[in-house]
């Protein structure tokens, strides 16, 4: 299987830094997994957008796929 490069937008870095450590490590693990499979089980393509969502607990990881690159656009809480 092809390997994808992971890029994280500056705004997403700030969002990740605001997540408590216990949840952040799980989220980072999922993000790293996107390098091998950018469409893992449980991911959803957002209707009307060229983005995907992957959930970890109460957080949503938002990203898009551009060729051989996965671009993380956000990691937000779903309250």
Image (cartoon, rainbow, N blue to C red):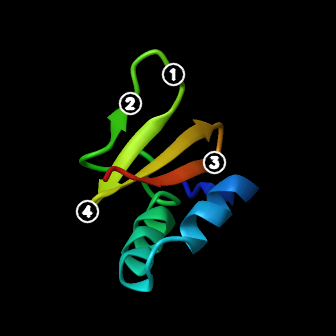
Disc assigned to residue 20:
none
> Residue at left 66%, top 64%?
13
Q: Are marks 4 and 3 in contact (CB under 8 Å)?
A: no
Q: What's the mark number on residue 45? A: 2
Q: Nearer the viewer, mark 1 or mark 3?
A: 1
Query: CB atoms at circles 4 and 2 under 8 Å apart?
Result: no
* 43 w.r.t. 2: above or below: above
Mark 1 lies on a secondary structure that is loop
> Of discs 1 and 4, which sits in the foreground?
4
Q: CA distance from mark 4 to mark 2?
A: 18 Å
Per the image, the residue denoted by label 1 is 49
Whole-percent x, y for residue 31 in the image: 48, 63
**What residue does disc 4 label?**
57
- Residue 45 drawn at (x, y percent): 38, 30
Among the two numbered marks 4 and 2 on one chain, the one whose residue lies closer to the N terminus: 2
The image quadrant of residue 21 is bottom left
Location of mark 3 (residue) = 71
How far separated are the C-alphas under marks 3 and 2? 14 Å
Circle 2 sits in a helix, a strand or a loop, which is it? strand
Give the structural element (helix, strand or loop) at label 3: strand
Marks 1 and 4, the one that precedes in the sequence: 1
Residue 50's place in the image compared with 36, above or below, is above
Q: Could you say where residue 29 lies in the image, as x and y percent from the top left?
A: 42, 73
- Residue at screen point 54% across, 25% down: 50
């Amino acid at each position: 299987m092809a390997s994808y490069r992971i890029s994280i937008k500056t705004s997403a870095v700030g969002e990740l830094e605001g997540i408590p450590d216990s949840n952040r490590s799980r989220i980072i693990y999922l993000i790293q997994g996107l390098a091998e499979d950018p469409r893992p089980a449980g991911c959803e393509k957002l209707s009307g957008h060229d983005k995907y969502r992957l959930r970890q607990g109460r957080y949503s990881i938002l990203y898009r796929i551009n060729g051989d690159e996965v671009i993380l656009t956000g990691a937000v809480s779903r309250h």
